[in-house]
Image: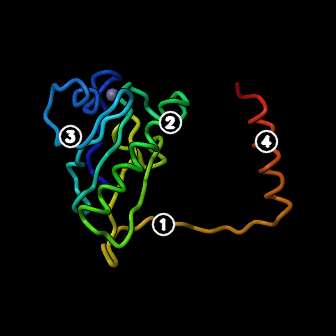
């Protein structure tokens, strides 16, 4: 996990300053809703961040249009990274909230070219609960979905 944590207030965060052109970034792509630039941390060559241009902290705050635009930009960057760096694989990584691993509190998705044995790890503690429990979780989610506009 990156060590840098940006605690700037909304609208003054490091990514808002990049969007506004107030601080330099190695920009790769931008459109009406998204901007893509090189991650200063560069886990592997070609590691890009795709951010919403508007300051939204997490995926919960994106509009449906912004969410779609971020994924479309991430796919384009992934295609470009495949062509430019020929990685063995590509990981899309997106974190929400400190507990989710977010360190810059402006929505962004990592497009990370991957190579065998590159040392990137994410602990994934499988629980494998009973099917009845999964049905209960699904019931709760379907009920919540039915309340969304
Ligand atoms: Zn921001």
Q: Nearer the viewer, mark 2 or mark 4?
A: 2
Q: Nearer the viewer, residue 112 or 101?
A: 112
Locate residue 104, reporting x and y percent. Answer: 33, 39
Question: How far apart are the alpha carbons under marks 2 and 3?
Answer: 20 Å
Residue receiving disc 4: 142
* Disc 3 + disc 4, Cβ < 8 Å: no
Which one is closest to the eye, mark 1 or mark 4?
4
CB contact under 8 Å: marks 1 and 4: no
Q: Residues within 10 Å of mark 4 (few under 14, many from 20)?
A: few
Identify the residue shown where x is 81% and y is 66%. 130
First in residue order: circle 2 vs circle 4: 2
- Residue located 43% across and 39% down the image: 70
Whole-Å distance between the Cαs marked 1 and 2?
26 Å
Who comes first in sequence, dot 3 or dot 4? 3
* Residue at numbered disc 1: 123
As helix, strand or loop, the secondary structure at mark 3 comes to strand
Q: Earlier in the sequence, mark 3 or mark 1?
A: 3
- Decide which of tag 2 and tag 3 comes sooner along the chain: 3
Q: CA distance from mark 1 to mark 4?
A: 28 Å
- The mark lying in front, picked from 1 and 2, is 2
Q: Quadrant of residue 146?
A: top right
**Marks 3 and 1: CB-CB under 8 Å?**
no
Q: Residue at x 38, y 41 (%)?
A: 108
For the residues labelled 3 and 4, the Cα–Cα distance comes to 40 Å
Task: Tell me the distance, in whole angstroms, between the alpha carbons under discs 3 and 1.
Answer: 31 Å
Query: What is the x, y in percent for residue 99?
Result: 48, 47
- The quarter of the picture where the C terminus appears is top right
SS at mark 2? helix
138 on left or right of 87:
right
Residue placed under numbered mark 3 in the picture: 27
């Amino acid at each position: 996990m990156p060590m840098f944590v940006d605690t700037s207030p909304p609208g003054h965060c490091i990514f808002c300053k990049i969007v506004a052109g107030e601080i330099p970034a190695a920009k790769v792509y931008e459109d009406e809703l998204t901007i893509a630039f090189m991650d200063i941390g560069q886990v592997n060559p070609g590691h890009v961040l795709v951010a919403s241009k508007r300051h939204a902290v997490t995926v919960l705050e994106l509009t449906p249009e912004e969410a779609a635009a971020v994924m479309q930009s991430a796919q384009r960057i992934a295609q470009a990274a495949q062509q430019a760096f020929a990685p063995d694989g590509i990981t899309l990584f997106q974190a929400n909230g400190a507990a989710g691993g977010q360190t810059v509190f402006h929505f962004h998705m990592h497009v990370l070219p991957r190579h065998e044995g590159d040392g990137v790890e994410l602990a994934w503690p499988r629980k494998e609960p009973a099917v009845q429990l999964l049905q209960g979780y699904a019931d709760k989610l379907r009920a919540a979905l039915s309340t969304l506009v």
